[in-house]
Image: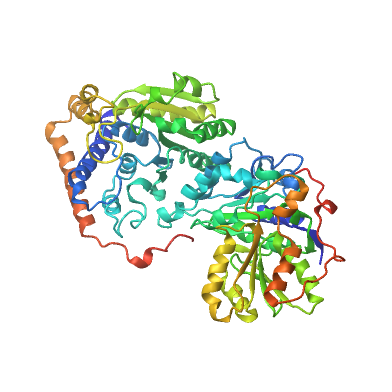
Amino acid sequence: MKKISYCEAINEALIQEMERDENVFVYGIGVPDHKRIFGSTKNLLEKFGKNRCLDTPLSEDALTGMALGAAINGLRPVLVHARIDFLLLTVNQLANMVSSYRYASAGKEKVPLVIRAIIGRGWGQSCQHSKSMQSIFAHIPGLKVVMPTTPKDVKGLLISSIRDDNPVIFLEHRWLYYAEDEVPEKSYSIPIGKANIVKPGKDLTIIATSWMVVEALRAAEVLEKQGIKVEIVDPRSLTPFDEKTITESVNKTGHCIVADFDWIHCGFSAEIAARVSNKCFKNLKTPVERIGFAFTPCPSSRPLEDCFYPNAVDLIRSVEKKLNLEKIDVSNEMFYSYERKFKGPF
Amino acid sequence: MDRLKLNTELYKSLYLIRKSEEKIRKHYFDDEMKTPVHLSVGEEAIAAGVIHALRKQDQFFGTYRSHGIYLARTGETDKFFAELHGKGSGLARGKAGSMHLCAPEQGFLGASAIVGSIIPVGIGAAFANKYTKSDKIVAVFFGDGATDEGVFWESINAACLWKLPILFVCEDNKLAVFTKDKDRQGYKSLNEIVSKFEINTFQEETTDVEKIYDIASVAIKSIKETGKPSFLILKYYRYLEHVGVNEDFDAGYRSKKEFKKWYEKDPIKIQRKKLLNLGVNELEIKKIENAIDKKIISSYKKAQKADFPDSCELEDEVFG
């Protein structure tokens, strides 16, 4: 099978869906410009023309209402934001309009739309180009929230999101754009609302979202050398939420760390912790632990950024505590450093 | 349509809207309609005139003050009153209430209670019509308060940029809740500013529904002829408080004198007079009115008797 990047997988999904259904169109600020949203909207303009691949005014609020109007009138819009931070300009449309439109019409109007937004990180992105915010959207009934980690997942889940008759917030991590994986060339869909057991294990469950899956995998490799087998579960979608797969895993291992790529306070990790505590209480050998961003705005300076974001080492230290292990020497281990892949600026 | 027939149809709509809302006013304090109502008393000519100027296939969106456009398009009162009562036989099975009326099968694609927020949705619907090469146009109704919102300007700009087949209808009562235009606007004339965009602009201050029908018809025709959106400002006087069923001339922000001036040219009164002038006799008018009165009474009774939705319906239609 061909290996392609996460970014190429997004592009393939868009092209295949636009070929399949002429009601699918892609738009947003800079979508057809020469950067093509980091390459993810490459060739759309050439293949489908400017009626189906649109540049737009800097009017995020109106563009979101526009997606709603187009969706109830028969189209399948895909609106793109180069950063989630920009998407915050549209929260009125999402929380007041898009999410409740179907409900308030008693199902007479369906709202098939996708809002792609990219989570930034690194190279000094600072406070307004680095947010994640998934819990905000997952808090609102009527919005589906999908957060894929692997190239295979991003393609299958984007295809499902476009075909879904409900609004889907689709969150892509900028660093994952470089991840490569074997991805089927043909069109396929992965059901929204099904968690993925990224790595099976028996000693402890790490529930990780987005980039934290990468960190968790690295932590698991180090721990494996000590004979510790960690199970990593990626929820992949926050709404709908696959409680079953997650609680089954924790009931098996008895230990749970939630590594959410977001702030901890009032975050999605709190939701998972509550559900796990509720459904796995008798089998839990230690309390649920949560790992996430420091509760500060994101700083620009690299050393401060390092303190802000959790990483594989934090996960290793947390596992040691839970399983009463001695401190593992990680001085000879290689951990992810973005400079090898991501040279900024955006 | 000949003039007599048109004016009769317009009168039927005006009368239906006025009497339906009078029925709401009469019973509101029975506490059976537990939904905030924003009544269109005084504004009926805009709803009736513009909706009748649209073709049946054309689509439209409204605000929380949308009883008028709903009744003008559908002529239906059973589901309407049932919805206000929160009943299972309501338009949206009791999930919408007064502020989120819609009848997509008849072109009424929805209404919003967040000022200005429906305007970009209208843009999207018009975009879809252009995209699919449909002949339909979209009308989006909003108040002058909505023009204070950023999304209004974003939407006007996008509609003009993409030459969308859309009619903007600004129902201008000079009030945003209770705040006057002069306390909100850093400019003199909305029409003047909007006309700087690539758009056809029209404005009228009249309570004559036929005149509104005529100007709306020209505005709609201009969309096709020029390939640009149209913008229509229609002035009116809100007879009642912002939300609720009462007069509020004692609140101090406006005078009853002003009301009296407008009431002299009340849209229902002048349209009735016009029908008489056009040769319809008193008996025929009474017949029309009685039929509508009966229909309202019957719908209201049905709504009172209808069942509430089953509690298991709560979670229906969050997702589809």
B170, B117: nearer the viewer: B117
In the depicted structure, whether residue A343 falls above or below residue B89: above
Which residue is the extreme one toward the right?
A332
Which colour scheme appears in the figure?
Answer: rainbow
Residue A184 visible here: no
Residue at image location 30% in from the left, 46% down from the top: B36
Residue at image location 64% in from the left, 51% down from the top: A116
B319, A17: nearer the viewer: B319
Image side of residue A169 versus residue A6, left or right: left
Which residue is the extreme one toward the left?
B283
In the depicted structure, whether residue A282 falls above or below residue B53: below
Position in image of residue B123 (x %, y %): 51, 39
**Residue A254 location, quadrant:** bottom right
Image side of residue B15 versus residue B189, left or right: left
Image side of residue A66 versus residue B248, left or right: right
B234, A244: nearer the viewer: A244
Residue at image location 76% in from the left, 40% down from the top: A34
Q: Report how many numbered discs are placed on residues in the image.
A: 0
**Residue B69 location, quadrant:** top left
Position in image of residue A233 (x %, y %): 66, 70
In the depicted structure, whether residue A232 falls above or below residue A296: below
Position in image of residue B213 (x %, y %): 35, 29
Image quarter of the N terminus of chain B: top left
B149, A284: nearer the viewer: A284
Residue A270 visible here: yes
**Residue B257 location, quadrant:** top left
Position in image of residue A206 (x %, y %): 67, 70
